[in-house]
Image (tube, rainbow, N blue to C red):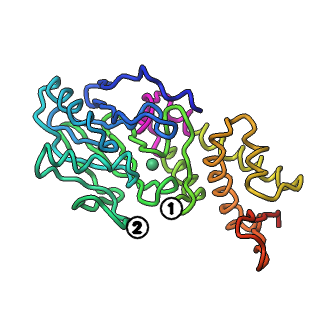
Amino acid sequence: MTSWIDPDFPRTATPTDLVGRVLGLNPGMMTGPGTNTYLVGRRDPILIDTGVGEPGYVPLLEGYLAERGWPRPARVIVTHRHRDHLGGVTQLRTRFPGLAVAKMIHRDTELPDPIDDLRDGQTVKGDGVTLVPVYTPGHASDHLCYHLLEENAVFTGDVVLGGSTTVIPSGDGDLADYMASLRRLQALGVTRIYPAHGPVIEDAQGRIAEYIEHRMLRERQILDALDVGLDTIPAMVKRVYADVPEKLHPVAAQSVESHLRKLAREGRVREDVVAAGSAPSQPARWRLT
Ligand SMILES: [Zn+2]
């Protein structure tokens, strides 16, 4: 899981005639080589995502635009509100005044700048390209993927990644929504995936099926752990994520919690209410119903 921070990942690339890629220069445990931003179109490209706001990003983007003979991005569309996708908006607008930015406005409390609302199915047209927003909550409640009709490809943001599994954050994340989103992407019948982190995925259907199977496996493992009497999230993480480095266990704990919340909604497990007076640090106890 940590090996996906690839220092040799190209800073810019041109996967196809219609798609260019510029790296957000924010490598890390959660971002892999960094956030991919994509320029889509034959000319006047649409920029998908903005990186986190690393100072080196705008010069890198400008260099790539110049290489392609493009003065600026026509507009920006964002996959979701997480900082490593939205954090570059301010610096981009400083460099390209008046740049229009759109995302799905949903449960947003503090957006950095004026941003236009974009909804599922509200097609965005560029030069020789058609991008259809596909509402795909689960990793984030405001998440849009973008279906590029001309290539039968999809920009998956953080729903499907090139080299890791997606985190379902407690709070805004929702595993049941996430599974439904994966099935929605599957039903598009796309052949290629442009993820927000990691390399292009050519076997889109295979990867989506793997993602679904991976979650179902985790669910079975968690049910097994409950069945043998493990009743707290830390204990379940230790068993289910035995092959994962311990420093990633806090992230794994969020994942286990997301599974438990989904199972609870389905009526298959329940969370025991902690008795009054017990230590607040006491982890919640779960059991099969
Ligand atoms: Zn994210």
Residue at 81 percent across and 59 percent down: it is: 231
Amino acid type assigned to the residue bearing label 2 in the image: Arg
Q: Please state the extent of the stretch shown in magenta in the rendering.
A: 188-208
Whether the magenta-drawn stretch holds residue 205 is answered as yes
Whether the magenta-drawn stretch holds residue 123 is answered as no
Residue 209: name its quadrant.
top right
Which quadrant does the N terminus fall into? top right
Assign a secondary structure to mark 1: loop
Residue 118 visible from this viewpoint = yes
Q: Nearer the viewer, residue 236 or 150?
A: 236
Above or below, 284 relative to 68: below
Find residue 172 and name its label: 1
**Cα distance between the residues tagged 1 and 2:** 9 Å
- The residue that disc 2 covers is 107
Around disc 1, counting alpha carbons within 10 Å, would you say few (fewer than 14), some (14 to 19), or many (20 or more)? few
**Whether label 1 touches label 2, CB < 8 Å:** yes
Which quadrant does the C terminus fall into? bottom right
Residue at 54 percent across and 44 percent down: it is: 166
Left or right, 164 with reference to 34: right
